[in-house]
Amino acid sequence: MSAAIADAPQLIALVGNPNCGKTALFNLLTGSRQKVANYAGVTIERKEGIAVTPSGRRVRILDLPGLYSLEPATPDEQVTADVLAGQRAGEGRPDAIICVTDATNLQLNLHLALALRRLNIPMLIALNMSDLAQRRGIRIDREALARELGVPVVETVGVRPAGIAELLKRLEHEWPLRRVTPDPQAGGAIDNSRDHAEVMRILTAATAGTELADTLSDRIDRVVLHPVAGLALLAVILFLVFQAVFAWAQWPMDAIEAGVAALADGLSALLPDNALRSLLLDGVLAGVGSVLVFLPQIIILFFFILTLEESGYLPRAAFLLDRLMGSIGLSGRSFIPLLSSFACAIPGIMATRTIQDPRARLTTIMIAPLMTCSARLPVYALIIAAFIPRQTVWGVLELQGLVLFALYVAGVVGAMAVAYVLKRWERGSRFQPLMLELPSYHLPHLRSLVIGLWQRVQIFLTRVGTIILSLMIIMWALSSFPAPPDGATGPAIQYSIAGYIGSGLAVLFAPIGFNWQISLALVPGLAAREVAVAALGTVYSLAATGDEVSGALTPLIAASWSLPTALSLLAWYVFAPQCLSTLATVKRETNSWRYPLIMAGYLFALAYLASFLTYRVALWWTGGT
Amino acid sequence: MSAFIANVIVYLVVALSVGYAAWRLGPVSFRRWLALRLQRRFPVLLRNLPLSVGGCGSSCGGCSLAAKPRATPAESRVSTQIPIRIHQPKR
């Protein structure tokens, strides 16, 4: 092993502008599967992985949030600035920097490269998206760029491993990379006009050809960013997503349901009538099976979310909605965190670190749980399937899809109303103009899409097989013990611990139409919302008397709930208090228990009020009392 | 299978589930406290006991994937994570 290789760097930081492909490179270098999307602000935390160099040496790679300059404006940029300055607790400065630059936007990216050069840390430039630059007619003379910058330059394509081997090889064999001594005339200080002149000089020396004036992205943007047509298109896209969730998922859901039923029949025939049989049939299969059946709908929802993320459409949607969001005290920058909250409120709340204004950030955190996270989907889908008939409206639209769309819209409208109230309350907040880089459109990569969906399947199945399974076993135990007294006439569950808890809670929830089974299911639902569906499955399975074998949950609740109760539960879940993990995340992000407590309180009050009104109006409408 | 064996299996499964749920849903400080003690007592057996669960582990994605790799108590003592706080504007 040569001396250079022996001294190769131990800690390498990937640094660059937002959305230049740092995380895609990180994934290729380390074999990780961190989230990648075609918009700025996806990475908001320091992430670390191990890369193996051609000589077999292991080096630590840091993936850092993107930034435009070394003067951080947001908490996520501060993370990068701190790492580069060696100010992170327990961590020294990186031994080397890979400055990831977007070859299609070199002028902007070189400003950061110059600033990084001043840090006097050995550096290498990864000229990323070089394939896209070539297609656009941008020719970059790599040797000239390396000469002008005084650092090695390697061409990479973030989604292909081609340039990665060369990147690692250069890093290892050219080590120690040359340190660039700060310009004595500049004295290391930041001088924007001087930097700009330097960038233009480098560009003149290293680039040839001009970007095609009218790219495909420009032509698409004429429609997508149109103030009227663009908004209409956004509404149509979202609408189609929810239609597809119901229209495409039916046969795989039927198949899963049939599989669970067959397994239950087999176990029922195989096992004698004892506690173990009840645990497996009423606890495990009835509980877990009732959640598992919603896997196809979750896959379809994420297929669309991932496709939109990869295509580059989402920042355009943020741009379109900026005016609307400004009117309720938010900026377009809140759009991406709120959109992330449709998957799960936790990454959405963490993504608020990209928001500069603390008040706008706090408001976004407070309303993020009102975006309909995917854990609500099983609850919505269960009730819709039980109470909304499968019929088409105007010949083409699925009524069930329409209702689901309306529920998502209700969450958004509720969030806007809360944001508006907070704006009136927080009079000191000021309007934050939206500065957003619009990435080029591209077709989603099939591999990324398949990996992304597979990860969602893994996460869902892991969750079903771990926390949901364990909670359902506990729920079964609480619902089965103690045994009913001699001479008891009702189902055994009524005399169990769970039965008593449910009856106690039902007093609180009776005014909004919830029976004791629903009231009981809300408790484990605090761990995660879809657990409520599994809990209902277990409770109704155990409530089946005599030789009656419980079937799928949907027909059971259709037979035992009234329409006002079902609508009231839907309204509850539009605003339902968050899962405990979300509240813990809010506590961590705000460094105080004050905000999670306020959040839990206002969401509970909102959910109760919405359910009460829905239940009473539905009772009046259906002629009930 | 006799009713006795069936009952023993059921009690074991329920006890394991209670332990697992308490671990998963309990506060991080409790997990850390318990893990440190368990690892002192069974250093080889529980060397890789995870202290933090990735995100909320829900079906939603994102946060679970972004979770840090498993950390041992020794690593957690030199954790480099600093909570990012909302800075109130100076008045």
Image: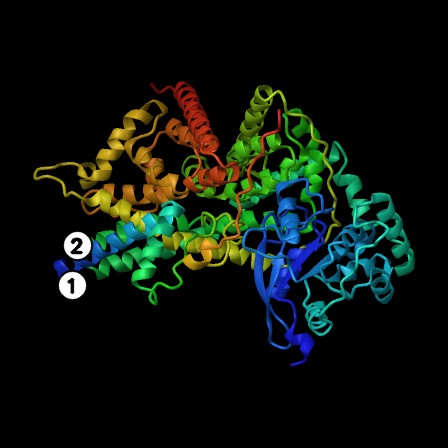
Left or right: residue A237 versus residue A377 is: right
Residue visible at 35% across and 56% down in the picture = B36
Q: Are marks 1 and 2 in contact (CB under 8 Å)?
A: yes
Query: Is residue B89 rendered to the left or right of residue A182?
Result: left
Quarter in which the N terminus of chain A is drawn: bottom right
Where is mark 1, residue-wise?
Answer: B1
Location of residue A555 (image quadrant)? top left
Quadrant into which the C terminus of chain A falls: top left
Q: Is residue A150 above or below residue A173?
A: above
Mark pair 1, 2: CA separation = 10 Å
Provide residue A3's location: percent of width, then percent of height: 68, 78
Towards the viewer: A234 or A523: A523
Q: Amino acid at mark 2?
A: Asn
A624 or A321, nearer to the observer = A321
Residue placed under numbered mark 2 in the picture? A274
- The part of the image, by quadrant, that contains residue A502 is top left
The percent position of residue A496, horizontal first and vertical second, equals: 19, 39
In terms of secondary structure, where does tag 2 sit? Answer: loop
Where residue A129 sits in the image (x, y, percent)?
75, 59
User: For the residues tagged 1 and 2, is the chain the same?
Assistant: no
> Which chain is indicated by disc 2?
A
